[in-house]
Each structure stands twice: as structure tokens, then as C-alpha cells.
Amino acid sequence: MRMSRIAWKSLRVRWVSLIGAFVALSLGVALMTVMLLGLAATARLPWGEAAIGLNSAFGTAGGVSTFVAGFVIASTFSYVVAQRQRELGLLRLTGASRGQIRRMVLFEALALGVAASATGCALGAAGAPRLGRELVLVGTAPDGFAIGTESWPLHAAFWTGLLVAVAGVAAAAYRAGRLGPLDALREADVNSRVMTPGRWLWGIGLLVTAMVLMGTALVDAPGTLLRRKNYTVQPMVLISACGLLTPVLAGPLLQGLGALPARLTSYAGRLVRANALGGVRRTGAVAAPVLVSVALAGSLLGGMNTVAAGRAAEAQAQSVPDHVLTPQRGAGVDALVRELRALPGVVVSPSAPTVVSVLESDGVQVRTEARAVDPATYGEVSRLPLLAGSLADLDDESVVLPEEWEQHTVGAPVELVLADGSRRTLRVAGVLRDGTGNNGLYLTARNAPGARTDRIELRGSGTAAIGASAIGASAIGVLAARYRAELATGEAWLAAAYPVAPNRVSWLRAVLVLGLALLYTAIGLANTLVLATVDRKRELAQLRLAGATRAQVIRVVTAESLLAVTVGAVLGAVVTGINLGGMQVALRLLGVDPPLVVPWQALGGTAGACAAIAVPCTVVAAAWALRQRAVTVLG
């Protein structure tokens, strides 16, 4: 028996059921191609903030597109194999071996993967240059940035897409091979053995892995949970676990969510809940892409907001100036500082940014930002979170650094490479709590060659604030105007320097990633709903013969879809809550007390978008399934 020939015929017959997987994989490979081409173009940029930001955006978007494409393909093939129970059983009855059945399913996935990967590479190569131009226009890439057409990203995207296609259907192929000849003698029951031993093993294993990763990070390095890559990628482990365990988790949720509609309606609510509980595999297949989309939206946007709020809270706790002056470059900063210090009752603390490299014991240079301050006055305008030592001990032969550095013992020597390339060995005068990552190195102006003052913090001496003295505030305003320096209150400066919301560039990058997730959700959701609804022709015909009108049947099926979407949204919200809860605990372990930030609009908007996709797809599919007379379908 030549299974490849049967596989080709099966693909020609069942091509409609695989459209969703084909489109998802094509778009996934296209986006992988674009992101890899973008990474290749970023490698040509000078290393700096722009290159780091683009690298992060391209890497995150590529990873999310690969993950969600694989998720959609695995979910689609799993449901398709469950629907083909009778067909595969007939093949077993006619002499096909278990291995032949598995090879046939894998061959179908391989054929689909080759076609989709080739299509995706072509689309990605065509769209990449345009994306580069758009990134420059919106300000997320520097002028002159352009994405080329190198060959290695095309090869990498093609083979990755093929690997995703085959890996995504591996479990479905194994399950298909376990069908016996007697399965041909009964109608396909998509709920038979939904939770196989392998699914239990992987689901619980990934759940434990997600908890261990979070627990280990909280114990060893809480700050790692605040990094963009971590709070974007790490939720995928928990999402995968919940996706595998959806049939188990959906039962209690369906009972609870369907209780009120069942009581408020005569029959429809009970019927909807019973159908959803009776078709747990179908419910899980619909809920899975919603879970992915809601969880990614909540975790990414919530993580960004939590980190921004944490940094703002940390800055507000550490910075206590009454006013802040931002001088223009080369506008007589030294003279401005002298005149400010001549004002009575005013503490003046200028500071300048610089860059130093810390030499680790293995000889590696770790570059970091630092700030040159005046030790005599900086303690009056800030409350640094010192764990050991004192800012008053800072002098030209010492440095204050964070706890994260390899050598952080007060009095110990630390070798630094200064901004001009010279090397100096300084002793540790103080050690700071790591915090959210904003606690850098502090040294004196002598160790910051070439640094220019960019901030002058002012505070009233003693307990009196500058604002309490109209003369002092007026004099500062006159000096600011004379030297063309920007004057702001301490609160206003903190709000501008450390906003409680992410900046525009971060939002644009998040929108790029979430747009991909929502696009894949639309594909997976529409494909699953159409397959599941059309496959229920006999069930819907029985409802018609029982006395239900066509409109009533469509409303019941649509309500089932909305209930499944709600289950997915609730599970996505739970995943979001776990991830954001871990970040809250991490911030508190780092000594920061941030407000609880929950992206309710993102969660509600994503769930609403999924519902808006589900309703028309279900209505159209149900109307198509009901186009024939009930007696004809059951005859």
C-alpha cells in the first residue's frame, strides 16, 4: 500500500480543513524571514541603543510568530486527526500498519510545510524592505536603516517552518497510529481519550517547569523577571501547559460560566452548557488560540506597565529635589552652578552621565552607565538604597556600585576602564541594592573624563523647601532664563524622566508582537470553528427534527462558541495574573513597592476581538451546515 499516494489524495480532499494551518505557517515563515532579515540588517548598525532595541524587537517578534504558528498547527492537526478516526480506522481495517498511518500523517504535514514555507519565504523577502522603511518613518529605527535580501535568513526561515510543521503534528501522528481497525465500525468520537498519557505528562511537566523557572528566578535573581525577553518568552511555557490541560481546566469553568445562563433560560442555556461539556475537545480547540492571544497581550503589556511603574516608584523614593535644571550643552554650565551656589539656603548638586567598564575576574569588560556626582551635596537631593557603606565616603579614589557586580564588598578594590580608555583601581565606598536596574555606578568628576553636566538638582537647605521662599524660586527662575536652562519641579521632572507608562517606541514594538498574536488567533479560531461546526451536521439536524428552528440552532451554536471563547479568555487572564504576580513579588524582593498594574483594556479588547471573530465564523458555518433538510442529512 503506497501511503504517499493516499496522503496526496487526502490533502486534495481535505484541503479546506488545512487552510488555517497553511495560512498560519505561511505567515509565520514570512514573519520569521522578515525578522531574520531585520536582524541581519541590525548587525550592520553601530552598537548602541538603536541596535539593541531593534535586536530585541526582531528577536521577540520572530520568537512569538514561531511559537504561535506551531501552536495553531498542532491544534489544527490534532483536531483534524480526531475527526478522521473512522477514515483512519478503515485504513487499518484494510491492512495499513500503525507505522504507515503515522508516516501518512507526517507526509501530509511535510507537504503542507514545504508549500507554506516556500510561500512564506517569498512573502517575507518581498515585504522586508518595506518594513525597514516603515520603521524609519515611525522613529523606531535610525535614518538610513534598510533591510536587505541576504540568503541565509531565507534558508533559516524555510527549514524552521518545515521543522515547526513536522514537530507540530508529531503528537497527532503518534495518536493516529494508535487507532485500531475496530475504530472504523463506529462514528468518530472527538472526545474519546482527550487526555492521553502523553498529554498529561507534557502538560503537567510544562506547568511544573514554569513554576520552577519563576521560583528559581525569585530566589536567585528577581531582576531577571523584569527583563523584556523574560516576561515575553517565559509566559509561553505556562501558556503551552494550560493549552495542553485545557480539556481538564475547561470542565469546571464551563460548569461555573454556564450556570447562570442555564438558570435564566428555559432550555437554551442548559443545552449550550451540555453541548460544550460533551464536546470538551472541541471546546478546548476553540479556547486554545484565545488563551494564547489573551495571555500574550496581558503578559507583555502588563509586564511593560509593571516595569515602568516599578521604575517610577523606585525613582520617586530615591530622588527628592525641589527643582531640577536641565542646562543646554555649552551654555555656561559652570557659571550657572556658581551663581546657583551663591543663593542663600539652596543646596546645588550637579551631576553628569558617563560610561565605564568593570573588569571581571575572567578579564571580561562589562560596560555600564555611571553618574559623576558631588558627594558633598548629592546625598541632600537623593536617598540612594545603600546596603553597605556610605555616599559620604565617596571620593576620587572610590566608587559606589550595585550589588549585582562581582566585587561588591566595601573597601575592596575594583578595576575600571574609564570613558577615555584609561584604567583605574578604585575601592568600593558603598554598595547599592540592585533594584529595577537603574541603580548604576556613582563616582566623582575626576573619574569621568569628558562628562558634561546634564542635570542640576536643587533643594532647600535644612527642612525648608525652595518653593517656600518666593525670593529663592524667583532667583532660580531668572538664572534659568539667563542661561537658557529648562526649569522643572522635582515632581514634574520625575514624571517626565520616569513615566509610569512605557514610551512610544516600546508601545510600537509591543503592538507589532501583539498584532502577530491576534492575527494567528484569528486564523486558528476561524479555522477551528468552521471545521467543528460543519462537522456537526448530524447533531444540528437532530436539533431541527426535535423542533428547533434554524435561527434557534444557529443561536445555540454561536452561544457555545462564545462560551468556549470565554473559557480561553479566563485561562489567559489567569496566566497573565500568575506572570504579573511573579513580577510584583520580584519588585518587592528588590526593595521596590510598585502599584498593581493590570492591563484590563488589553485583556478585554483582545477577548472582545476574539469574540468578534468567533461570532460571524460560527454563524456562517452553522448556516452552511443547515443548508440541507434534516431528513436528508440523517438519511
Image (cartoon, grey):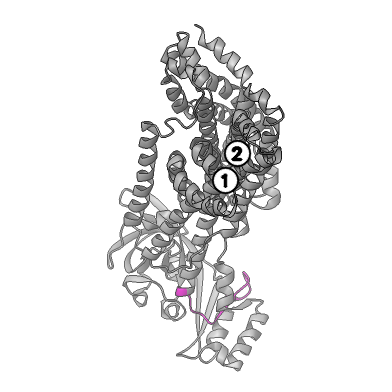
Q: Residue 565 carries which label?
A: 1
- Residue 333, percent from left and from top: 58, 75
- Residue 446, percent from left and from top: 44, 69
Pick whichever, 44 or 186, lies toward us: 186
The answer, for residue 334, to whether it is visible in the render is no
Q: Give the residue at mark 2.
A: 525
- Placement of 199 over or under 316, stated as above or below: above
The answer, for residue 87, to whether it is visible in the render is yes
- Placement of 45 over or under 507, stated as above or below: above
In this view, the mark in front (2 or 1): 1
Q: What element carries label 1?
A: helix
Residues packed near mark 2 inside 10 Å, few (<14), some (14 to 19) or many (20 plus)? many
Given the image, on which type of amino acid does mark 1 rest? Val
**Residue displayed at 46% across by 56% down:** 577
Pick whichever, 5 or 498, lies toward us: 5
- Placement of 204 over or under 158, stated as above or below: below
Pick whichever, 592 or 329, lies toward us: 592
Given the image, on which type of amino acid does mark 2 rest? Leu
**Residue displayed at 42% across by 42% down:** 248
**Residue displayed at 55% across by 54% down:** 263
- Placement of 95 over or under 190, stated as above or below: above
Q: In this picture, which residue range is highlighted in magenta?
A: 317-334
Q: What element carries label 2?
A: helix
Pick whichever, 574 or 83, lies toward us: 83
Q: Do the residues labelled 2 and 1 touch (CB within 8 Å)?
A: yes
Query: Which image quadrant: the C terminus?
Result: top right
Tell me the quarter of the picture where residue 203 sits: top left
